[in-house]
Every structure is written in C-alpha cells, then in structure tokens.
Amino acid sequence: MPSATPSPAWDGRRPTTGTEPGAAALLGWLTDPDAPRLCLVTGAPGSGKTALLGWLAAHGPRSGRTRRRPARVLVPLAGQSALGTAWAVADRLGVVAGTPGDLVGALATSEARPTGRAVLLLTDLHAAAEPDALARLVTELAEVGRVRLVVEARDDTPALAALRAGHRVAVVDLDGGPGPFDPVEEPARPLPDLSDPAAVCAADPLLVTTAYVTGSAPAGVPGTLDGPEPSGETADGHGGLRTAWMRAGQSLCRAQPPADRALVLLAALGDGADPRLRPTLAELAAGAPWRLRWARHRGDLTPPWPGPVTVLGAAGGPLEGTLLVGDRTGTVRLLREADAGSAGRLAHAVPGRITALAPAPDGTVLILDDRGRLHTVRGTVSRPPYLERLTEAVSATLARHPGTALAAIGGSVVVGDRLGSVHAFGLTGLHQAASHSGRVTAVAAVDSATPFVCSGGADGTVRLWTPGRDPVPEPLADRRSPVVSLHAAETPHGPLVAVAWGDGLVELHRPEGGPKLSFRPGPPVRAVAVTGSGSLLVGTDESLLCLAAKK
C-alpha cells in the first residue's frame, strides 16, 4: 500500500473496532492521485473485509463540507457471473451494457453528466460464480480513467492472485483475529425452474442470470412449459426465455415488481419462442402500466425484423398509419403501424447516415444527414409554393450552419444546433430560443390547439417552447443522462412526449398533466416515437417495440 495516512476527510467516525487501520488506508488511497486505480482488500474469513467495504460505501465527508465526492457503488459478487456484474455496475453508473466488454467501452465514452470519478466496491470475489472472468473484467475497468475499484476477497482466492500478478495494485491486508461483524454466509438458494416464466419473473434476477450463463439449472421440471421444442429459440433449452433474458438482461435485473419484469421479458421474446410463453407472460404482466402491441427482433421471420433502428418517424396525412424506420446505412423502411408489416421503402438519395426524420403533414419527408444538411423527399401531393420556399430557405441556412436535430409541422421547420439553441423557421419569420447547455440532440413539434416545440439536449433536460413566446422556465424532465431521442404528437389522449435517455430509460410525458410512464427495454435505445393513436415506439440495434399505455 503506497500510503496508510488517514484522509483529510477523516472526521472521527470510525468503523467497528479492529479495522480502523484498514479504513484509514482506504481513505488515504482514495485521496491519493498517484495511487493505483485498483485496491485489493484481503484477509482471513471473519476479518471484517465485507463490513469494511460496506462502511466505506456509506462513509461521507466531514460534516459541513460541500465538496462532492466520487460516487461509491457497492456491488456484491457472491454468486455472480461476469455478465450479471456488468449489468449491475452499468445500471448503477447510468450506462447501458449488453456484455462486460460493452461496459468497459460505455464507461470510457459515456456522455453522462459529470458526477466525479466513480469508485466500485466489489465484495466476495472468492464466492463469485465466475471469479476468473470477473478478475479479467476488473483489470479492464481499472484502465478506465473515471473508475477506481476496491475488490475484496479471501487470501487464498486464485482470482485475487491473478489480479496481483503483473498489475500495479494497492493492498489493504486485514489479516488478524475474527471480527464480530462479517455476515454469516447464507446457504445456497434453490435455483428457479428456468423454463417457467412465473418462477423466472419472481426469482432473484442475479441468480437467474448466473444460472442462464453457467447452465447450472436443468430444464424439464414437471408442470412447466418445458417439453417438445418446436424450433428456433426453443433450442436454448428454455422455450426462448433464456434468449429473451439475455436480450433485455440489464432491465430485468433492476429491482421491480414481477409484473413489470414479465412485461420486459414479453417485449424481448422472439417469434421462434415456445408459443405458450407469450400468453403466459402477458397474463403475468397484467399489473404493468403498459400493454405490448407487438415486438420485432433480430432473427424474427413473421413479419421479418426491419433491421437496426437509428431514427424513427410516425407519419400523418397521406402516410397516416405508416412508420418510418431508418437504419445506420441510410435506408428508410416503411412499416404498417398495426403490425410492423412492410409497406415498402422511402425513395430517397441521401448519402451517409440519417440523424433525423421529419414527416410533414402533406406527405413530404424532411431528412437531416450526419453532416447537419437538410434533404427533401416529396410525397404524392403537390406542395404549396410557400412551403417549397420555406424548405429551400432552411436548407440554405443549414448548408452554412449545420443542424443537430429536426422536426416539422404544417407551416414550420424546427432545427436544433450544437450550441444549445432551437430555431423555428415559419411563414411569419424566424423564432429562436437558447434552451440547452450544449448540443440539442432532438426536437419535436406538435400542431395542437396551442402549438409547441419540445427539445432534448446533451445536458439531460427536456424543454417546452411556443415560438414567439418565452420558453417554459421549468424543464419537462431533467436527468443525469443525455437525451438521445425525443418525439411528440397530438393524440386522442392529448399531446404526448416520448423521451429516451442514454442510460436506457424511456418515458412518456403528458405536458397537459397526468402521470408519466417509464419503460426500459434493456439494450441502448436509439430512437423513440409517438404514433397518432398514442402508442409508443422504441427502437434499438436489434429490436423495434410498440407499446400502448393502459387506461
């Protein structure tokens, strides 16, 4: 250990007798900028290792100090797989990760609002289901600049020896007499039947994850859905439940009622799953606030998966009931809202990636490319000359000052920029509002009784504005994560605003009042949209979902 000097933040509050030197050393390590990024807490069973990390997670700065400290995130490793740990850490740190490698990349590149460096406190490495894989994950995380790690394990743990070998680490050794405060190890919990959706939704999700990863729970328990396997995803041995769990795992591992977990699992179920699973999960999800209309996933055949989603649009006018789904290659597919069946493709010649779609009421579709330039795809109805002139003026402006977000209503085109401003180009002139700190990531416009513009930013805020008036001072939403997509529409239930954040959360807001609803599909959300009927569309790299709020 480079230094065992007590931290300046030490205020006299001490952990249980016996670990004071270790506590002082840990606090000194936290405040030493030259210390290794990884600290190992070792010792014999009963020496107080786990209790010390629990104390460190709760220990705060001296009373009266306002200095913000790095977030301290305690994650128990007992019984954990590397995948389950990655999901737990990602959720606590506000990023989305499908795999341990995704977690490392997400933490290295996250746009999350700065909250200081994170300190991960990982207990019981010796009791993990995959200690060697976890040791590799810890090593990779220690290379991420915003993360420090404290890992606790018994002295004889092989994975602990692997962390010590060839790496620069600090060590706090609590070798000594048994302490009275280490928790007694609990007996192994019985594994749920992984082919029974009710058991899976009610069980400890980290236990389910470990069992699916390691294959430690056999299928075929009498009285469950296990039996003859029709085809496709049932090859996972659990009727398709395992495939769905792996697709939505980070969301499923959050603390939530079984009904909400059943909804997420139902939304992640592919069309090759055991046909008995869908009605069973729908019944289990009866208490959730959403009803799943349909879901399309990578590998689905009836109807086929439309491809990775990068942008979404819900059209009106001549395209009423049609969804526009853009992928990373620039292709825009047209789907029927009712069932996601194919309705053709948008005929356009936009090179490169599309960052925003804005269907206009007359059937014209405006497109923003990744250089911030505007393109127009005309519909079957001829446009009035004044709209043509308006579009040409906006296009000329964006050629000089690229946009970052785009929306359109009857007589207006709305654009966001990288400096945080929103510009509404209309027949009566140009209106502007400095709505965000940093880049505007999404805008939407609603042609309701009182037309308004909704914008989201990298600053994590969602704001409302009626062009020609001052912006609403209080944000509609404000979170510690960048807005990645936003859409609004007038519906039979009043105006609705859908928002997706970088941490995987999707919310549906009612600007005129009413409860907000939330949903987390599991993977990173790339785009959201609200249809004219009030349904919510959620697009990811491998799924497109359609949800309806229950009355």
Image (spheres, helix red, strand yellow):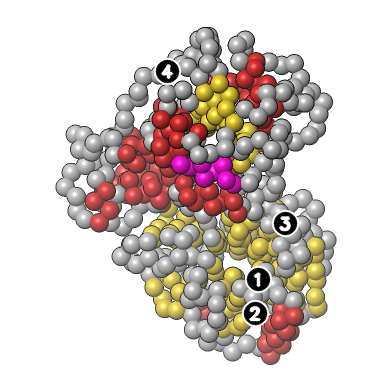
Q: Is residue 273 above or below residue 430?
A: above
Residue on which disc 2 sits: 374
Q: Are marks 1 and 2 in contact (CB under 8 Å)?
A: yes
| Label 4 or label 3, whichever comes before in sequence order | 4
Disc on the earlier residue, 3 or 2: 2
Say if mark 4 contacts mark 2, CB within 8 Å: no
What residue is disc 4 on?
A: 185
Question: Residue at position x 71%, y 16% from top?
Answer: 13
The disc placed on residue 463 is 3
- CA–CA distance between discs 4 and 3? 50 Å
Q: Nearer the viewer, mark 4 or mark 3?
A: 4
Element carrying mark 3: strand
Q: Residues within 10 Å of mark 1 (few under 14, many from 20)?
A: many
Earlier in the chain: of badge 3 and badge 1, it is 1
- Rounded to the nearest angstrom, the CA distance separating label 3 from label 1 is 15 Å
Q: Which residue is mark 1?
A: 406
Residue beneath the point at 59% across and 89% down:
382
Which amino acid type corresponds to the residue marked 4 in the rendered image?
Glu
Q: Which residues are magenta?
A: 136-144
Amino acid type of the residue that numbered disc 1 sits on in the rendered structure: Leu
Q: Dot 3, how many residues are within 10 Å of its Cα: few (below 14), some (14-19), or many (20+)?
A: many
Look at discs 4 and 2 and give the one toward the viewer.
4
Tell me the residue at 66%/62% (across/down).
441
Question: CB under 8 Å between callouts 4 and 1?
Answer: no
Q: Residue 210 versus residue 47: which sits nearer the camera?
A: 47
The answer to whether one can see residue 466 in this image is no
Locate the N terminus by quadrant. Answer: top right
